[in-house]
Image (cartoon, grey):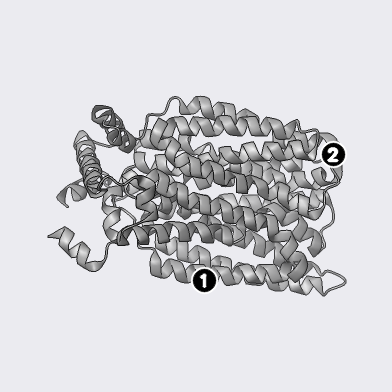
């Protein structure tokens, strides 16, 4: 107990604010840049699909499959990333993710037909799944407790930045001939993938993975670089080695997956929290709203393709601005307040968007004020997502699992995330045709009300606690009392 107090004290500056370790900051930046690739794909596909469906004469079902397939196949990468990162390390798994996405981007950019394009989506999706699981885990494991929320939110910051880049490239390339512009939109993602893979080579390995592999001296060297003092590094190493030893003795020789599929009571609570937050992140429909914003606004009365892409740029700027706000305040206010604010704000925004869309559906002349309401509501929805669910899902699900189970536990939670994202993206248009866009947004608003209730009752606050302390939050009261005696 005293050691964590000493660690916390050393992490604070004279102003009382957590001191940001520059080396840990650089590691988090490098690890999280992979997320740009997913964000870029989400953003760029929303515009590229307008031209792809004309070139390949796609039906609405084929359009949904094309858009959503990347999310579904990222499930394969997410499931495989846990075992891979425990085997070869977090760092080399990040490089593998970038290399896989590089191949997928080239296949998409050069695709001569719809099946070839789908093959590129499959490969890129696997790379995305690897990246989404391993980047938050690595960042959480390398970060000091007092700044872990800020640093672990970087994957979402880069996803959002990637979405904005995708929108900007959509707008910049939309005036090119239709048989060229979408190829450039999709294929350009191959170039940052190379840079990311080379940059990650300069990162150290996760100290917790090194301890798990018995490389104590190497772990200590990394901790000294990511801590403010040598004493703090020693205290962190003591916590990690003790937790690793306790986990090994408590596992009774069970394999990781057996432990996850036959969990103890505290682990059941951890799984419920991790899977729940990942489920609601995608059940909120945020990815589908981003993918299909042009379709939504076309129905609302905006018919110019340049205008449709322009609106998405405005949405991207709003989304990026608020994810930065969340990252800055995450360690000050905590996970729960921002998560509850975000989900409540999304529910209200989706209700406004649903009612505005319903009005426009029954209006012949499409009044400007109603279109403006829908634009503002969409921007508010993605902004509240960027305050709460967007960054906090990655932070929370990567920090609550014990070290021995972290990679594969997070892998399981992210797999649920990817599966739900794919299902929502691949059914959004079909369901909206049945119940209209307005009806769809009202359904999503109801889901966000349920999400707010779930977060309130099942997600304890983790702000300022070391990864080794967080497990006690999910024990019952009697267990907590016994562990403090």
Circle 1/circle 2 CB separation < 8 Å: no
Q: Residue at x 79, y 71 (%)?
A: 360
Q: Quadrant of residue 73?
A: top right
Q: Which residue is mark 2?
A: 178
Q: Residue at x 39, y 63 (%)?
A: 459
* Spot occupied by residue 102 in the image (x, y as percentages of width and height): 62, 30
Q: From the viewer's perspective, is 301 left or right of 424?
A: right
Q: Give the foreground label among 1 and 2.
A: 1
Q: At 42% from the left edge and 64% from the top edge, which residue is drawn?
A: 337
- Residue 455 visible in the picture: yes
In this image, 462 relative to 28: left or right? left
Q: Mark 2, residues whose alpha carbon is within 10 Å: few (<14), some, or many (≥20)?
A: some
Residue 204 is situated, as x and y percent measured from the top left of the image, at 37, 29
295 relative position to 91: left or right: right
Q: Secondary structure at mark 1?
A: helix
Whole-percent x, y for residue 280 in the image: 53, 61
Above/below status of 343 relative to 39: below
* Left or right of residue 231, residue 30 in this image: right
**Is residue 26 visible in this depiction of the protein?**
no
Residue 85 screen position, x and y as percent: 42, 36
Q: Quadrant of the C terminus?
A: bottom left
Q: CA distance from mark 1 to mark 2?
A: 42 Å
* Marking on residue 450: 1
Q: Which mark is residue 312?
A: none
Dot 1 surroundings within 10 Å: few (below 14), some, or many (20 or more)?
Answer: some
Camera-side residue: 74 or 148? Answer: 74
Query: Which quadrant of the view contains residue 214?
Result: top left
Q: Residue at x 37, y 50 (%)?
A: 258
Label 2's element?
helix
443 and 24: which is toward the camera: 443
């Amino acid at each position: 107990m005293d050691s964590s107090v000493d660690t916390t004290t050393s992490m604070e500056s004279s102003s009382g604010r957590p001191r940001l370790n520059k080396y840990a900051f650089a590691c988090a930046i490098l690890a999280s840049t992979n997320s740009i690739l997913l964000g870029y794909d989400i953003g760029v596909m929303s515009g590229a699909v307008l031209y792809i469906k004309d070139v390949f004469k796609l039906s609405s079902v084929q359009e949904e499959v094309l858009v959503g397939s990347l999310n579904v196949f990222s499930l394969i990468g997410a499931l495989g990333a846990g075992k891979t990162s425990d085997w070869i390390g977090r760092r080399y798994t990040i490089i593998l993710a970038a290399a896989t996405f590089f191949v997928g981007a080239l296949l998409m950019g050069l695709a001569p037909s719809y099946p070839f394009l789908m093959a590129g989506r499959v490969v890129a999706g696997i790379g995305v799944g690897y990246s989404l699981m391993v980047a938050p885990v690595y960042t959480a494991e390398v970060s000091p407790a007092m700044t872990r929320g800020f640093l672990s939110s970087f994957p979402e910051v880069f996803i959002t930045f990637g979405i904005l880049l995708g929108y900007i490239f959509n707008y910049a390339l939309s005036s090119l001939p239709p048989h060229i512009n979408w190829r450039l939109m999709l294929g350009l993602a191959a170039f940052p993938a190379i840079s990311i893979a080379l940059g990650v080579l300069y990162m150290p390995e996760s100290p917790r993975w090194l301890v798990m592999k018995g490389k104590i001296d190497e772990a200590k060297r990394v901790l000294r670089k990511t801590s403010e003092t040598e004493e703090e590094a020693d205290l962190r190493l003591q916590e990690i080695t003790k937790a690793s030893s306790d986990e090994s003795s408590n596992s009774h020789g069970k394999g990781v997956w057996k432990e996850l599929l036959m969990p103890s009571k505290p682990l059941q609570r951890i799984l419920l929290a991790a899977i729940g937050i990942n489920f609601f992140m995608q059940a909120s429909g945020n990815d589908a709203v981003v993918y299909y914003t042009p379709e939504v606004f076309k129905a609302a009365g905006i018919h110019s393709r340049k205008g449709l892409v322009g609106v998405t740029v405005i949405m991207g700027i709003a989304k990026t601005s608020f994810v930065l706000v969340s990252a800055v305040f995450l360690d000050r206010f905590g996970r729960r307040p921002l998560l509850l604010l975000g989900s409540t704000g999304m529910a209200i925004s989706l209700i406004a968007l649903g009612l505005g869309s319903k009005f426009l559906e029954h209006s012949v002349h499409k009044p400007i004020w109603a279109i403006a309401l829908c634009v503002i509501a969409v921007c508010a929805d993605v902004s509240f997502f960027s305050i709460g669910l967007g960054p906090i899902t990655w932070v929370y699900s990567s920090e609550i699992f014990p070290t021995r189970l972290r990679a594969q536990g997070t892998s399981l939670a992210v797999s649920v995330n990817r599966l739900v994202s794919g299902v929502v993206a691949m059914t959004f248009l079909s369901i909206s045709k049945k119940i209209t866009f307005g009806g769809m947004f009202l359904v999503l608003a109801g889901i966000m009300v349920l999400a707010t209730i779930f977060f309130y009752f099942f997600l304890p606050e983790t702000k300022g606690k070391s990864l080794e302390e967080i497990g006690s939050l999910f024990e019952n009261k009697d267990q907590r009392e016994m562990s403090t005696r």
